[in-house]
Amino acid sequence: MGAEGLHCARDGIVRGCRYVPSPNCDERPAHETVSLLVVHSISLPPGTYGGDFVERFFTNRLDPDAHPYFEAIKDLRVSAHFFLRRDGEVVQFVPVGRRAWHAGASSWRGRARCNDFSVGVELEGLDDAGYEPRQYERLAELVGALRAAIPLAGIAAHSDIAPGRKTDPGPLFDWPHFLARLAHS
């Protein structure tokens, strides 16, 4: 259990997170093992932090009239397992044992369909903006809680599993800092 009390329970819900169930998930293929964590970034509308637009988006409740950008994404049905706000709050949308719809067309180390074997974590942010120290702390805590429950063997950026199609979490995500935090958590 992490310093903040994060603990992945048998039902795949991480205690210490706020749970907001998303309908945008389904069962993983039989006998599939979760072995990869994918780091993403999102803000809605782009460049705006706070509020509940990301939660509404992942739960199919986003009002397309609330912002001009939302018209372009109104028909998308996506989710992630977790959303890490800039203040460090962790929101969970999908139990770890279920498949969230976060990776899209993707491949990792020769394996296609990364949604089948990965957990998706969205950081509140943009590719071309830095992330908050609290986000790195909480991400390391979350990874620690997940590693205690599932055999995570790798951590990758969305851009690593969908090169040419995705760029998040972007060049300003401080991988050396995050990996150092992870080694000490």
Image: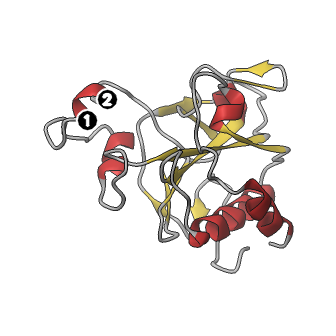
In the rendered image of this protein, does residue 130 appear above or below residue 40?
below
- Are dots 2 and 1 in contact, CB under 8 Å? yes
Position of residue 117 measured from the top left corner of the image (x, y, whole percent): 72, 33
In the rendered image of this protein, does residue 38 appear above or below residue 50?
above
Residue ID at (56%, 24%): 104
Residue ID at (19%, 41%): 67
Residue identifier under label 1: 69
Position of residue 20 measured from the top left corner of the image (x, y, whole percent): 41, 54
Q: How many marks?
A: 2
Q: How is the image coloured?
A: secondary structure
Which numbered circle lies on residue 36? none
In the rendered image of this protein, does residue 185 appear above or below residue 95?
below
Mark 2 lies on a secondary structure that is helix
For badge 1, the amino acid type reads: Tyr
Say few, some or many: other residues with alpha carbon within 10 Å of mark 1 (under 14 / 14 to 19 / 20 or more). few
Q: Quadrant of the N terminus?
A: bottom right
In the rendered image of this protein, does residue 147 appear above or below residue 73?
below
In the rendered structure, the answer to whether residue 139 lies left or right of residue 1 reads: left
The one nearer the camera, 65 or 35, is 65
Say few, some or many: other residues with alpha carbon within 10 Å of mark 2 (under 14 / 14 to 19 / 20 or more). few
Mark 1 lies on a secondary structure that is loop
Residue ID at (53%, 65%): 17
Residue ID at (83%, 20%): 110
Q: Quadrant of the C terminus?
A: bottom right
Can residue 25 be seen here? The reply is yes
In three-dimensional space, the C-alpha distance between marks 2 and 1, rounded to whole angstroms, equals 7 Å
For badge 2, the amino acid type reads: Ile
Can residue 7 be seen here? The reply is no
Position of residue 178 measured from the top left corner of the image (x, y, whole percent): 74, 61
Residue identifier under label 2: 73
Mark 2 vs mark 1, foreground winner is 1
Position of residue 12 measured from the top left corner of the image (x, y, whole percent): 63, 52
